[in-house]
């Protein structure tokens, strides 16, 4: 039973750490989205001023190397955020399993 309690404490610590990581990654995700949208909007305005046909501006802007790099960074930030979120979900499941095992051992007569 002591092993289960130790394992639960370890997972709780990992869960707390994952929550802190999620916060940081959430902030990074929001900043990456902001940077991408601002740069894209600027490039769209530049292309409009240059007389580019409206129907192709979106494709041209998204194909710009700097804009594409910002979109990549945004997508990476999103993936890292989702990974941290999944770690939290898994840790909660593991805690639940260990809690059920602990309750089972607690109730079972020796």
Image (cartoon, helix red, strand yellow):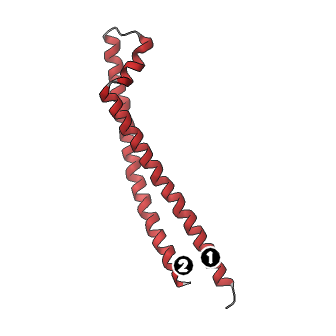
Q: Quadrant of the N terminus?
A: bottom right
Residue 100 x, y percent position in the rendering: 63, 73
Q: How crowded is mark 1: few (under 14 residues within 10 Å), some or many (20 or more)?
A: some
The label on residue 23 is: none
The label on residue 4 is: 2
Q: In this view, does 85 lie to the left or right of 37?
A: right
The label on residue 101 is: 1
Element type at marker 2? Answer: helix
Which quarter of the figure has residue 101? bottom right
Q: Is residue 62 left or right of residue 12?
A: left
Verify CB contact (< 8 Å) between mark 1 and mark 2.
Answer: yes
Which quarter of the figure has residue 74? top left
Residue 86 x, y percent position in the rendering: 51, 54
Q: How far apart are marks 1 and 2 (CA)?
A: 8 Å
Residue at figure coordinates x 58%, y 73% from the top left: 98
Residue at figure coordinates x 34%, y 17% from the top left: 45
Element type at marker 1? Answer: helix
Residue 69 vertical placement versus 63 (above, below): below
Residue 12 vertical placement versus 68 (above, below): below
Q: Residues within 10 Å of mark 2 (few under 14, many from 20)?
A: some
Residue 83 vertical placement versus 1 (above, below): above
Residue 34 vertical placement versus 65 (above, below): below
Residue at figure coordinates x 33%, y 24% from the top left: 64
Q: How many labels does the image show?
A: 2
Q: Quadrant of the C terminus?
A: bottom right
Between discs 1 and 2, the one toward the N terminus: 2
Residue at figure coordinates x 39%, y 56% from the top left: 21
Which quarter of the figure has residue 41? top left
Residue 79 x, y percent position in the rendering: 44, 45
Residue 33 x, y percent position in the rendering: 39, 36
């Amino acid at each position: 039973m002591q092993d289960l309690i130790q394992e639960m404490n370890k997972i709780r610590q990992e869960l707390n750490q994952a929550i802190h990581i999620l916060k940081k990654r959430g902030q990074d995700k929001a900043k990456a989205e902001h940077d991408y949208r601002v740069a894209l909007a600027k490039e769209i305005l530049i292309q409009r001023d240059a007389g580019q046909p409206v129907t192709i501006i979106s494709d041209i802007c998204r194909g710009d190397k700097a804009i594409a790099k910002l979109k990549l960074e945004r997508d990476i930030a999103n993936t890292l955020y989702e990974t941290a979120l999944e770690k939290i979900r898994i840790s909660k499941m593991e805690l639940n399993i260990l809690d059920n095992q602990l309750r089972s051992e607690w109730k079972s007569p020796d």
